[in-house]
Every structure is written in C-alpha cells, then in structure tokens.
Image (cartoon, helix red, strand yellow):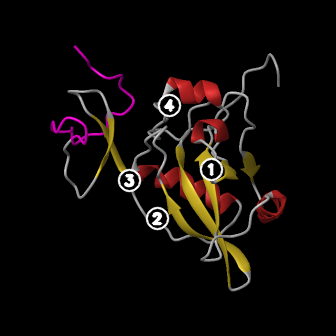
Amino acid sequence: MEGARRKHFRKKNARLYQYVGPERLRLAVAGCPIGVRIASLGEIENWMSSLEREPNAAGLMPASFVVDLNGHMRVADSNSEHIAVAGGMPVLAAGKIFFGTGDRSLEVVEITNQATGFCPEPKSWEAVAKAIEKVPLSHPGKFTSEYVYRRCESCGELNVVKGNLFICDFCNASLPKVWNCSRPPKLD
C-alpha cells in the first residue's frame, strides 16, 4: 500500500492513544518487527507455536498486545515493548494478555491494560473486546486487572494510580482525576 493512505478504523468517541513513553525506547525498538495480526484462532495457534518459550507455571501463554487503528489485535512475546508491537503507530488499546486452553479450546484467561508507553484507560476495554470477538475467542468480559494512569502536572512524570490515591509517586503532588497522559508535561 505504498503511496496510498491507509484507512483506519476508529469508532466515534474511541480514544486514540499516542506513545507517551521515553523517546530513547521508541528509537531503540524502531527496527523491531511489528506484532502479529490476529484475526483467527489458527493465527493465534501458529503464533504460539512459533515462539521459543513454553507456557508459564499456570499453563498460560503471556503476550504483549495492542489494538491497532483498524481494530485488529496484534500480539508479540510478552517481553516486547508495546510501541514495537504497534509498529510505532498510535493504538486503540494496549496491555498484557494471557492465553490458555479451557475446555480444550483457546481462550483469553487474563488481560490487563498494563502498557506504560501508551497509558490506556480502563475504558479501552471496548476496543479490546471487539478485537477479541472478531477472532472469536472466549474472554473474561473486562480487564482482569485495570491500571489507571495520570501525568503529574507538577513534575511531569507519568504515574500508575494505586489504591485510588491520586498522589504523585515522584513529588507527592495531587494528580488530576481526569486522564491527562497525552499532554506533554508542564514544567517551569
């Protein structure tokens, strides 16, 4: 599709998450392969069999994932940076996913929005669910662990909010209640 503009899926009101992680990391993974697009059970099985690793102690296969601009899930080894999985592009969602075999069929057992390079909100689940259901795969119906991210407006650092305490881990300033991770830090 060189020279032609790609058409991107994006539901009205769906947030587009830009990469907000360290620039040095983006540059370091720029040449890494993009995540494998998953559109069928066979593609997941092929991807899993191509890995040089075994399931974890719980029998689950962990992966890093993103939902791309076309609404498709892309996966890579769980040690992969989300910006590499996304091919350097913005995403509709990102996190960690754990595949397992329940009742002899492949399913999503655990899934999170843990992706500090994009800081996706828990409400990004809607895009995730649609991507998983396209395959189709059984899933838990929500993130099994949800992460809330905020940028400190005093020191500029990104934070994971813990225990519903909106306090910066770096400077102890109050964090905003509204998602603000796409804004560049306001530093004096």
**Dot label at residue 18:** 4
The type of residue carrying mark 4 is Gln
The residue where tag 2 is placed is 142
Dot 1 falls on a residue whose secondary structure is: loop
Which mark's residue is nearer the viewer, 4 or 2? 4
- Marks 4 and 2 sit apart, C-alpha to C-alpha, by 22 Å
Q: From the image, state whether disc 2 or disc 3 is nearer to you.
A: 3
Question: Which disc number belongs to residue 35?
Answer: none
Distance of label 4 from label 1 (alpha carbons) = 20 Å
Q: Residue at x 77, y 62 (%)?
A: 48
Label 2 vs label 1, nearer the camera: 1
Q: Residue at x 41, y 51 (%)?
A: 123
**Do tag 4 and tag 3 residues touch (Cβ < 8 Å)?**
no
The range drawn in magenta is 168-188
* Residue bearing the label numbered 3: 147
What is the C-alpha distance between the residues marked 4 and 3? 17 Å
Q: Amino acid at mark 1?
A: Asn
Residue 181: in magenta span: yes
Label 1 crowd (10 A; few <14 / some 14-19 / many >=20): few
Residue 106: which quarter of the image? bottom right
Percent from the top left, x then y, of residue 34? 72, 38
Q: Earlier in the sequence, mark 2 or mark 3?
A: 2
Residue 188 vertical position relative to residue 8 in the rendered view, above or below: above
Query: Whole-Å distance between the Cαs marked 2 and 1?
Result: 23 Å
Residue at numbered disc 1 = 79
Q: Is residue 169 left or right of residue 36?
A: left
Judge whether 32 appears above or below 125 on screen: above
Mark nearer the viewer, 4 or 1 = 1
